[in-house]
Amino acid sequence: MNTLSGKVALITGGAAGIGRATALLLAREGAAVAIADMNVEAGRSVVAEITQAGGCAIFEPVDVTRAEDCKRVAQRTIGQFGTIDILCNNAGIIRRATILDLSEEDWDQVMAVNVKAIYLLSREVIPQMQKQGHGSIINTASGWGLAGGAKAAVYCASKGAVVLLTKAMAVDHGPQNIRVNCVCPGDTDTGMLRNEAQQLGEASNRFLSDAAKRPLGRVGSPEEIAQAVLYLASDASSFVTGTALVIDGGGLAGSV
């Protein structure tokens, strides 16, 4: 449909899961895509898939918790494509534990990847968006950024921070025509979801079956979350900013 023709998107965590699905979808819609991830092999594979389909993409190995890496990928994207219209702060990790069982190292790592990275990369990209007079930033939060969950203390804390950071950024940068929103996925069939089962010592099939206990009776797919990101990246959402868009099959529908 080419709804993003002429646009440039930078996507963190773009080598797998929701990030990969988002990169492929935005490329199909006409955007040039820069993929940032620590997984070099997987990142290059996504680029190859996009270019073989006639799209335009680059990969940059990035640790999103390092300021110099965030600066490098922003500069390379602008140098390669001339601008950044869309920033998807998607990189994220999870550690399933209560406060009592969580190490200080794990706390720091989750907060760095899930929250600090948004600050670091947005700080590099927003000046370009201000210069060009527009931009759309989409942060990946979670349903657990709006409601608590068992044995997920630091993950819930980090994703709750993403929701309010998104709103604060929307207030600050709306006057420059920069929209800032976040998506709040429910359980989605990704490697990270299956890794949660391992962390909790549960069988993968049983864990996924329990995760499907929501009104729509299933977990989501990365492609379904990517469709929501596309909406927020496109002009279809031109009057939408500061929103936490829940895509969870009704999982939070019964919550207060």
Image: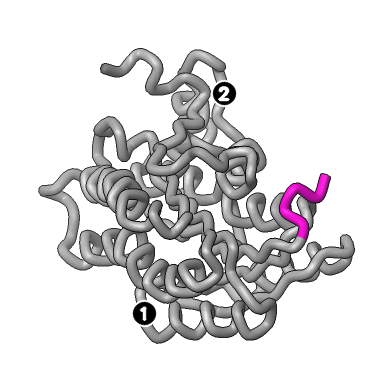
User: At 51% from the left edge and 39% from the top edge, which residue is drawn?
Assistant: 239
Sequence-wise, which precedes: disc 2 or disc 1? 1
Residue 69 located left or right of residue 30? left
Quarter the N terminus occupies: top right
Mark 2: which amino acid?
Answer: Arg
Residue 222 seen in the figure = no
User: At 70% from the left edge and 53% from the top edge, which residue is drawn?
Assistant: 26
Mark 1: which amino acid?
Answer: Arg
User: At 77% from the left edge and 57% from the top edge, which residue is drawn?
Assistant: 5
Residue 172 seen in the figure = yes
Name the spot of residue 204 as percent of width and height, x first: 50, 38
As for residue 50 lying within the magenta part, the answer is: no
| SS of the residue under disc 2 | loop
Name the spot of residue 208 as percent of width and height, x first: 51, 31
Residue named by callout 2: 218
Name the spot of residue 190 as percent of width and height, x first: 56, 46
Residues shaded magenta: 1-5
User: At 11% from the left edge and 48% from the top edge, which residue is drawn?
Assistant: 100
| Disc nearest the viewer among 2 and 1 | 1
| SS of the residue under disc 1 | loop
Residue 21 located left or right of residue 145? right
Name the spot of residue 74 as percent of width and height, x first: 52, 78
Q: Quadrant of residue 58?
A: bottom right
Sort mark 1 into few (<14), some (14-19) or many (20+) by Cα contacts within 10 Å: some
How many circles with numbers are drawn on the protein?
2
Q: Quadrant of residue 52?
A: bottom right
Residue named by callout 1: 66
Which of the pair 99/179 is nearer the observer? Answer: 179
